[in-house]
Protein backbone atom coordinates (compact mmCIF):
# COMPACT_ATOMS: atom_id res chain seq x y z
CA UNK A 1 0.00 0.00 0.00
CA UNK A 2 1.37 3.40 -0.99
CA UNK A 3 1.91 5.85 1.87
CA UNK A 4 0.24 9.22 1.37
CA UNK A 5 2.63 12.06 2.11
CA UNK A 6 1.91 15.71 2.74
CA UNK A 7 4.02 17.71 0.30
CA UNK A 8 5.39 20.92 1.78
CA UNK A 9 8.10 23.39 0.83
CA UNK A 10 10.33 25.75 2.75
CA UNK A 11 11.79 28.78 1.01
CA UNK A 12 14.50 30.38 3.14
CA UNK A 13 17.92 31.77 2.27
CA UNK A 14 19.35 30.92 5.71
CA UNK A 15 21.02 27.50 5.63
CA UNK A 16 20.71 27.03 9.40
CA UNK A 17 16.99 27.82 9.32
CA UNK A 18 16.47 25.29 6.51
CA UNK A 19 18.41 22.68 8.46
CA UNK A 20 16.45 23.26 11.72
CA UNK A 21 13.19 23.15 9.81
CA UNK A 22 14.15 19.88 8.13
CA UNK A 23 15.13 18.37 11.49
CA UNK A 24 11.84 19.51 13.01
CA UNK A 25 9.90 17.87 10.17
CA UNK A 26 11.74 14.61 10.87
CA UNK A 27 10.64 14.80 14.53
CA UNK A 28 6.96 15.09 13.65
CA UNK A 29 4.88 11.96 13.25
CA UNK A 30 3.28 13.11 9.99
CA UNK A 31 4.30 11.59 6.66
CA UNK A 32 5.76 14.47 4.66
CA UNK A 33 7.90 15.18 1.67
CA UNK A 34 9.83 18.40 2.15
CA UNK A 35 11.13 20.49 -0.74
CA UNK A 36 13.83 23.04 0.21
CA UNK A 37 14.57 26.23 -1.74
CA UNK A 38 16.98 29.10 -1.06
CA UNK A 39 14.97 31.93 -2.62
CA UNK A 40 11.77 32.87 -4.38
CA UNK A 41 13.26 32.45 -7.83
CA UNK A 42 14.06 28.78 -7.15
CA UNK A 43 10.57 27.87 -5.99
CA UNK A 44 8.86 29.83 -8.76
CA UNK A 45 10.97 27.99 -11.32
CA UNK A 46 10.02 24.67 -9.67
CA UNK A 47 6.30 25.53 -9.52
CA UNK A 48 6.20 26.66 -13.14
CA UNK A 49 7.71 23.42 -14.49
CA UNK A 50 4.27 21.77 -14.29
CA UNK A 51 5.41 19.36 -11.63
CA UNK A 52 3.19 16.29 -11.19
CA UNK A 53 3.19 16.92 -7.43
CA UNK A 54 2.93 20.45 -6.07
CA UNK A 55 3.41 21.30 -2.41
CA UNK A 56 0.15 21.68 -0.54
CA UNK A 57 1.77 24.23 1.77
CA UNK A 58 4.72 26.58 1.33
CA UNK A 59 6.54 28.13 4.28
CA UNK A 60 7.93 31.33 2.78
CA UNK A 61 10.54 33.61 4.34
CA UNK A 62 10.10 37.32 3.61
CA UNK A 63 13.66 38.63 3.51
CA UNK A 64 15.55 36.81 0.77
CA UNK A 65 17.80 37.84 -2.10
CA UNK A 66 16.86 37.68 -5.79
CA UNK A 67 13.07 37.39 -5.29
CA UNK A 68 11.87 38.16 -1.77
CA UNK A 69 8.93 36.52 -0.05
CA UNK A 70 6.31 39.14 -0.90
CA UNK A 71 7.29 39.20 -4.57
CA UNK A 72 7.17 35.41 -4.60
CA UNK A 73 3.77 35.39 -2.90
CA UNK A 74 2.42 37.84 -5.52
CA UNK A 75 3.65 35.57 -8.32
CA UNK A 76 2.10 32.48 -6.75
CA UNK A 77 -1.24 34.24 -6.20
CA UNK A 78 -1.29 35.61 -9.77
CA UNK A 79 -1.09 32.09 -11.26
CA UNK A 80 -4.45 30.29 -11.32
CA UNK A 81 -2.64 26.94 -11.60
CA UNK A 82 -1.07 27.57 -8.17
CA UNK A 83 -4.04 29.00 -6.29
CA UNK A 84 -4.65 25.71 -4.45
CA UNK A 85 -1.31 26.04 -2.65
CA UNK A 86 -1.48 27.41 0.89
CA UNK A 87 1.25 29.87 1.86
CA UNK A 88 2.47 30.46 5.39
CA UNK A 89 4.81 33.39 5.74
CA UNK A 90 7.63 32.21 7.99
CA UNK A 91 9.77 35.15 9.05
CA UNK A 92 11.80 36.69 11.85
CA UNK A 93 9.85 39.90 11.27
CA UNK A 94 6.89 40.67 13.49
CA UNK A 95 6.43 44.09 11.88
CA UNK A 96 2.78 45.06 11.49
CA UNK A 97 3.64 46.40 8.02
CA UNK A 98 5.03 43.01 6.94
CA UNK A 99 2.06 41.19 8.44
CA UNK A 100 -0.44 43.50 6.74
CA UNK A 101 1.37 43.20 3.39
CA UNK A 102 1.40 39.40 3.60
CA UNK A 103 -2.32 39.34 4.43
CA UNK A 104 -3.14 41.75 1.58
CA UNK A 105 -1.15 39.67 -0.92
CA UNK A 106 -3.02 36.49 -0.08
CA UNK A 107 -0.91 34.55 2.42
CA UNK A 108 -2.92 32.06 4.46
CA UNK A 109 -0.94 32.34 7.68
CA UNK A 110 1.83 34.41 9.26
CA UNK A 111 4.32 32.68 11.55
CA UNK A 112 7.16 34.39 13.39
CA UNK A 113 10.20 32.11 13.56
CA UNK A 114 10.53 30.70 17.07
CA UNK A 115 13.70 30.86 19.15
CA UNK A 116 13.84 27.18 20.11
CA UNK A 117 13.84 23.86 18.29
CA UNK A 118 11.10 22.50 20.56
CA UNK A 119 8.81 25.43 19.76
CA UNK A 120 9.59 25.11 16.03
CA UNK A 121 8.63 21.44 16.09
CA UNK A 122 5.39 22.24 17.93
CA UNK A 123 4.48 25.05 15.51
CA UNK A 124 5.11 22.96 12.40
CA UNK A 125 3.18 20.02 13.84
CA UNK A 126 0.18 22.22 14.63
CA UNK A 127 0.22 23.95 11.23
CA UNK A 128 0.44 20.65 9.35
CA UNK A 129 -2.68 19.49 11.19
CA UNK A 130 -4.80 22.48 10.12
CA UNK A 131 -7.89 21.59 8.10
CA UNK A 132 -7.21 24.01 5.24
CA UNK A 133 -10.54 23.25 3.59
CA UNK A 134 -12.26 25.08 6.48
CA UNK A 135 -9.64 27.69 7.33
CA UNK A 136 -9.94 29.71 4.08
CA UNK A 137 -13.59 30.44 4.76
CA UNK A 138 -12.75 31.76 8.20
CA UNK A 139 -9.56 33.71 7.46
CA UNK A 140 -9.49 37.08 9.21
CA UNK A 141 -6.70 39.33 10.40
CA UNK A 142 -7.30 37.95 13.89
CA UNK A 143 -6.58 34.32 12.99
CA UNK A 144 -4.02 35.09 10.27
CA UNK A 145 -1.15 35.40 12.75
CA UNK A 146 -0.14 32.04 14.18
CA UNK A 147 0.51 32.25 17.90
Image (cartoon, rainbow, N blue to C red):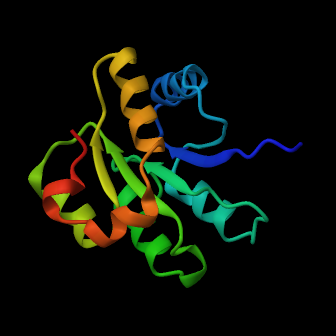
Image point 49% across, 22% down: which residue? 20
Image point 31% across, 42% down: which residue? 91
Q: Position of residue 104 (x, y in %)?
A: 23, 72
Describe residue 99's horizontal placement relative to residue 124 as left or right: left
Q: Position of residue 144 (x, y in %)?
A: 23, 56
Describe residue 121's horizontal placement relative to residue 113 as left or right: right
- 83, above or below 13, in the image: below
Image point 59% across, 64% down: which residue? 44
Image point 79% across, 41% down: which residue? 3
Describe residue 143's horizontal placement relative to residue 36 as left or right: left
Describe residue 23's horizontal placement relative to residue 133 as left or right: right
Res 127 seen here: yes
Q: Position of residue 69 (x, y in %)?
A: 39, 56
Q: Position of residue 108 (x, y in %)?
A: 35, 61
Choose between 45 and 24: the one closer to the eye. 24
- 82, above or below 15, in the image: below
Say which quarter of the image contains residue 105: bottom left
- 127, above or below 84, in the image: above
In the picture, which quadrant includes the C terminus? top left
In the picture, which quadrant includes the N terminus? top right
Res 107 seen here: no
Say which quarter of the image contains residue 102: bottom left
Q: Residue furthest front?
A: 1
Numbered label tally: 0
Q: Residue furthest left?
A: 96
Amino acid sequence: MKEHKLHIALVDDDEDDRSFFEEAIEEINIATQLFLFENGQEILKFLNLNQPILPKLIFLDLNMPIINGLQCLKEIRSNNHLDIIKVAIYSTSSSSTDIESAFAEGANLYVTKPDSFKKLTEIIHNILRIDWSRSDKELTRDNFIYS
